[in-house]
Image: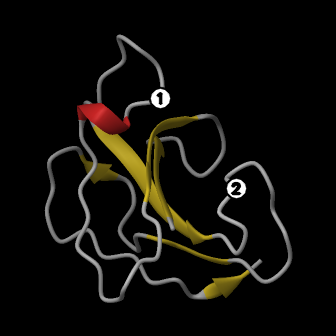
Amino acid sequence: LFIIARGAGGAAGAPLAVKKIARPVFPLNYSLGPEDVMMTGMGLTGEVFISARLDKDGNAMTQETGNLAGEFKNNPVKVGSQKVDIVLDRVM
């Protein structure tokens, strides 16, 4: 499972932060923090677009058919928010 934060502009663009969770058990509590930021020196501030992808092969770079995906229904969300629930409701 990949939990992904992107700039508040939406689902396009490079991720600001990514958390990989091996063998997730649902429902799942998660958090994104400084350890998940993709680029050194960048921080998570302001608003972000939160999404998730359950990737069959565990490789974030591949996009095979059958992966599940979803977004937080009230995107964008302010960094530090709680109860940012994501439903994996789309088959890729």
The location of residue 70, given as percent across then percent down, is 54, 75
Q: What element does badge 1 sit on?
A: loop
Q: State which quadrant residue 92 falls in.
A: bottom right
The residue under label 1 is which amino acid type? Answer: Met
Name which residue lies at 67% across and 52% down: 60
State the mark number for residue 59: 2
Name which residue lies at 36% across and 17% down: 42
Left-right relation of 69 to 7: right
Q: 9 or 24: which is nearer to us?
A: 24
Dot 2 or dot 1: first in sequence order is 1
Position of residue 33 relative to residue 20, above or below, is above
Separation (CA) of disc 2 from disc 1: 16 Å
State the mark number for residue 24: none
Q: Which residue lies furthest to the top in this view?
A: 41
Name which residue lies at 47% across and 67% down: 22
Q: Which mark is nearer the camera, 2 or 1?
A: 2
The residue under label 2 is which amino acid type? Answer: Asn
Q: State which quadrant residue 72 falls in.
A: bottom left
Label 1 sits on residue: 38
Left-right relation of 67 to 14: right
Left-right relation of 66 to 75: right
Q: Which residue lies furthest to the right in this view?
A: 65
Q: How crowded is mark 2: few (under 14 residues within 10 Å), some or many (20 or more)?
A: few
